């Protein structure tokens, strides 16, 4: 049963795409195996940069992400229950998709979003996500450093548990394992009253 979400049409929730909506890590590791013959598991990726977790160079990682951004991003599986969750959230909040993908991926990214019927109000490409902290009231992310940047500005973060963000801890970081947990967090009366300033 879906949690009950209070309507608050002018509250902006920022949502990352890679590894929050799109299972990007799965595609990146497959590409690394395809190009360099290196087989890996998700649990091995304990650093944000793949070249720090696997025996590849920064230049090789750049090649892999170039392939991903030019074509393979369309092949990424959707994270379980992401589509349904964004549909529920979009009925009550403004959904801004905030991605560090380069702007050149805009068309392919929109194509992927349309293929998977992702509900959203705005798509923003930014290498400096923190510049949006004064508009975003809640961020949903997998990047631990970005999470810390936001909570240091007073913005709560729902952080999807991933091997590469285990060291990032803060009272305003709410860790979740999946979209069901994320929705339950947002639906919590105390959370909405304290962080989204909604009357419960």
Image (cartoon, grey):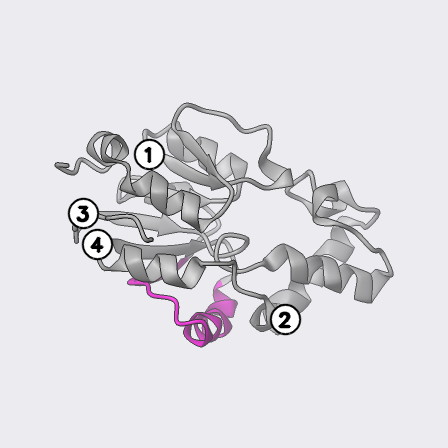
**In contact (CB < 8 Å): disc 3 and disc 2:** no
Indicate left or right for 197 with 1 as reference.
left
The residue labelled by disc 4 is 92
The tag earlier along the polypeptide, 2 or 4, is: 2
In the picture of the structure, the residue carrying the numbered disc 2 is 72
Which dot, 3 or 2, sits closer to the camera? 3
Q: Residues within 10 Å of mark 1 (few under 14, many from 20)?
A: many
| Alpha carbon separation for disc pair 4 and 1 | 19 Å
Determine the residue positioned at 64% across, 55% down.
Answer: 25
Where's residue 103, x and y in %?
47, 64
Residue 2: % across, % down: 32, 53
Q: Residues within 10 Å of mark 3 (few under 14, many from 20)?
A: some
**Tag in front: 3 or 1:** 3
**The magenta stretch spans residue 115:** yes
Q: Mark 3 and mark 1: span between their CA atoms?
A: 19 Å
Q: Position of residue 142 (x, y in %)?
A: 52, 44
- Give the residue pinned by disc 1: 155
Q: Which region shows up in magenta?
A: 103-124
The residue singled out by tag 3 in the image is 6
Q: Residues within 10 Å of mark 4 (few under 14, many from 20)?
A: some
- 23 sits left or right of 171 in the view: right
Instruction: Please report the residue visible at 59 percent of the width from the left and 66 percent of the height from the top.
Output: 76
């Amino acid at each position: 049963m879906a949690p009950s979400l209070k309507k608050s049409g002018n509250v902006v929730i920022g949502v990352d795409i890679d590894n929050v909506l799109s299972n990007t890590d799965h595609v990146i590791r497959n590409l690394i195996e395809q190009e360099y013959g290196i087989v890996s598991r998700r649990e091995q990726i304990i650093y944000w940069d793949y070249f720090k977790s696997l025996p590849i160079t920064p230049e090789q990682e750049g090649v892999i992400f170039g392939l991903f951004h030019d074509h393979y991003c369309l092949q990424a599986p959707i994270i379980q229950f992401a589509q349904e969750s964004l549909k529920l959230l979009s009925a009550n909040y403004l959904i801004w998709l905030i991605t560090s993908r380069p702007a050149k991926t805009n068309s392919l990214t929109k194509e992927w979003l349309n293929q998977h019927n992702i509900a959203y109000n705005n798509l923003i490409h930014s290498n400096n996500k923190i510049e949006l902290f004064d508009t975003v009231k809640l961020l949903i992310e997998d990047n631990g450093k970005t999470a810390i940047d936001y909570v240091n500005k007073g913005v709560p973060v729902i952080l999807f548990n991933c091997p590469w963000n285990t060291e990032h801890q803060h009272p305003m970081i709410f860790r979740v394992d999946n979209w069901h947990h994320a929705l339950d967090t947002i639906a919590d009366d105390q959370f909405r009253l304290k962080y989204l300033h909604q009357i419960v």
